[in-house]
Image (spheres, rainbow, N blue to C red):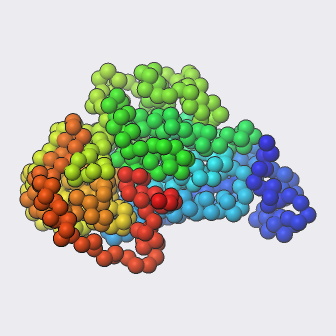
């Protein structure tokens, strides 16, 4: 198999003299035209601390490629900051950015004839966006994670961006002063790297390593550590080996590999966004993964990690004790992982784990026989409120079921106003609707309201359900991704204030105590709202996007 499987169409032959002329201008020499060309997709930008250092990592990856017989070309794709857009209309663009990232990487790589691809991501949507593109292209590829942020320190305790969101709730409840709120704000984000708990970025980075698409240990490195730069150099070297062996993403991203990724997400107590993203990534790889698979696997996979947001420790502590490889070893020894899955090292997961010691101890990562929770914290709930499914994050600390009367809001802003004005009472089930993929549009994350609830001390006393989604930083009794969404006339659109809602993680149900006949009456009176956007990226997304139960993807026909 030629090492220049795609770039030969660009560089070989007398008729490609114009093509080569263009490449000479960006640094190609005569010898470079004989080498495989590797695209390096960088998500560098100064719009977020998650990505502000990724240009330096891209430079290191190019060194690894160029030193080992390839020719690298760096190009950029976008990123947006969930932390900055959270709680604003700008959050509508967050999930859309996943599709833009995937589309742009596919577009550049396909147009330029790259033989291989390295992608580097920092903020939440970077990771699945990169993986979707790599799966579509199916050319030798490796993902590099930008790494986790170091925690900030306030009053000798670690703080992060979620601490600030929760401080807003505490301030609204008059538990802290405005001065203390500002001091937490100033301390929370000390430098580069992704948010420092087991939030969506760290969840997805860990899932991708378990999937086999990044190098061992890549997902649990601090952004500013020397290990991160070494990881980039090694990735460049390994990518050339993958090209020589013609090992492609779909050789690695198998059904069993996705089950490994789900297992790790559960063991780490990871973000509910992983459901959405893994479904989308599997679709791009032509793997038939279904939302019900999360419940099937969740019955036997325990939650082991005592990490924020539901737990105690920051990601930096997990990195200190060895990160993901020892955890993979613990899970593999317990027969909870498929060891024969191929990885980007060219070896199987089992082979990668040879020599790895399970030295994690019992503090941050619990033993298999003494878990934080014996089964998954992620529950797929169905019932008359979510006939196509919904995603609950139930750590067990809040209890396993909740029953209460609905307090209904037709947007995140409406709900947030009610919370900050202390209008939410104990026992309520907050309903935020018309925030789904089509209705939002964009399926905003509800970190601001859930954090404000926590900050007011109501985390164990209220529940929140939505056709939107949640940040990886969210904790409490929450259910998102309710399908069909309100914009499509799903049952969530028919809820009235005071309706009794029952959430049960044991029976995996989400129910409204309203008769079928009454729901039918309400449905006859219901009218689909006018689209909020009639042009631009948001409009296009709302027309194309699938149900959240299928990953909110935009590239599959009906």
Q: Quadrant of the N terminus?
A: top right
Q: Is residue 428 something one can see in this rendering? A: no
Task: Answer with the quarter of the image where residue 321 lies.
Answer: top left
Q: Which residue does the image show at 42% across and 73% down from the upper left? A: 539
Q: Which residue does the image show at 21% across and 51% down from the upper left? A: 384
Q: Is residue 407 left or right of residue 328?
A: left
Q: Is residue 44 left or right of residue 425?
A: right
Q: Vertically, is 399 above or below 86? A: above
Q: Which residue does the image show at 47% across and 28% down from the upper left? A: 337
Whole-percent x, y for residue 470 in the image: 31, 54
- Decide which of 326, 102 is in the foreground and name it: 102
- Decide which of 356, 544 is in the foreground and name it: 544
Number of numbered labels in the structure image = 0
Residue lying farthest to the right in this orientation = 14
Task: Answer with the quarter of the image where residue 532 lies.
Answer: bottom left
Q: Vertically, is 229 above or below 95? A: above
Q: Is residue 57 left or right of residue 274?
A: right
- Decide which of 234, 439 is in the foreground and name it: 439
Q: Is residue 308 something one can see in this rendering? A: yes
Q: Is residue 265 left or right of residue 215?
A: left
Whole-percent x, y for residue 27 in the image: 78, 62
Whole-percent x, y for residue 483 in the image: 31, 55
- Decide which of 554, 355 is in the foreground and name it: 554
Q: Which residue does the image show at 20% across and 65% down from the upper left? A: 523
Whole-percent x, y for residue 262 in the image: 42, 38
């Amino acid at each position: 198999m030629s090492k220049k499987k795609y770039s030969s169409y660009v560089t070989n032959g007398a008729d490609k003299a114009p093509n080569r002329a263009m490449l000479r201008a960006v640094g190609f020499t005569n010898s470079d035209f004989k080498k495989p060309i590797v695209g390096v997709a960088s998500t560098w930008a100064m719009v977020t601390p998650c990505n502000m250092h990724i240009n330096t990592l891209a430079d290191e990856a190019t060194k690894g490629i160029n030193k080992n017989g390839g020719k690298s070309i760096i190009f950029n794709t976008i990123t947006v900051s969930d932390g900055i857009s959270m709680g604003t209309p700008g959050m509508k663009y967050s999930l859309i950015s996943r599709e833009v990232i995937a589309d742009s990487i596919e577009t550049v790589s396909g147009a330029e004839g790259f033989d291989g691809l390295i992608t580097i991501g920092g903020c939440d949507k970077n990771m699945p966006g990169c993986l979707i593109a790599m799966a579509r292209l199916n050319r030798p590829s490796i993902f590099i994670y930008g790494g986790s942020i170091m925690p900030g320190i306030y009053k000798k305790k670690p703080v992060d961006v979620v601490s600030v969101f929760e401080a807003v709730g505490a301030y609204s409840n008059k538990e802290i002063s405005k001065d203390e709120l500002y001091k937490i704000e100033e301390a929370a984000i000390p430098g580069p790297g992704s948010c420092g708990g087991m939030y969506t970025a760290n969840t997805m980075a860990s899932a991708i390593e378990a999937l086999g698409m990044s190098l061992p240990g890549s997902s649990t490195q601090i952004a500013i550590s020397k290990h991160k730069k070494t990881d980039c150099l090694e990735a460049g070297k390994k990518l050339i080996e993958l090209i020589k062996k013609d090992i492609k993403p779909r050789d690695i991203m198998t059904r069993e590999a996705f089950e490994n990724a789900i297992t790790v997400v559960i063991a780490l107590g990871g973000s509910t966004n992983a459901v959405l993203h893994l479904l989308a990534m599997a679709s791009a790889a032509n793997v038939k993964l279904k939302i019900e698979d999360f419940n099937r696997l969740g019955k036997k996979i325990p939650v082991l990690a005592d990490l924020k947001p539901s737990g105690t420790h920051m990601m930096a502590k997990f990195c200190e004790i060895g990160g993901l490889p020892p955890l993979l070893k613990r899970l593999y020894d317990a027969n909870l992982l498929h060891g024969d899955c191929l990885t980007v090292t060219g070896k199987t997961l089992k082979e990668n784990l040879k020599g790895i010691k399970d030295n994690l101890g019992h503090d941050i990562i619990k033993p298999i026989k003494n878990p934080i929770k014996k089964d998954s914290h992620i529950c797929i709930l169905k019932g008359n409120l979510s006939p196509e499914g919904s995603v609950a994050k139930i750590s067990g600390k809040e209890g396993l079921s909740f029953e209460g009367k609905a307090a209904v809001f037709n947007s995140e802003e409406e709900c947030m106003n009610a919370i900050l004005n202390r209008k939410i009472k104990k026992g309520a089930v907050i309903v935020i609707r018309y925030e789904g993929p089509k209705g939002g549009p964009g399926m905003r994350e509800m970190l601001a309201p859930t954090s404000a609830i926590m900050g007011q001390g109501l985390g164990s006393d209220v529940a929140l359900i939505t056709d939107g989604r949640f940040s990886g930083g969210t904790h409490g009794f929450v259910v998102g991704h309710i399908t069909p969404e309100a914009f499509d006339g799903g049952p969530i659109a028919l809820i009235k204030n005071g309706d009794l809602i029952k959430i049960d993680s044991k029976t995996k149900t989400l129910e409204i105590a309203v008769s079928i006949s009454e729901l039918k009456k309400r449905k006859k009176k219901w009218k689909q709202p006018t689209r909020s956007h009639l042009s631009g990226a948001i409009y296009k997304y709302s027309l194309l996007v699938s149900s959240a139960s299928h990953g909110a993807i935009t590239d599959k026909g009906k």
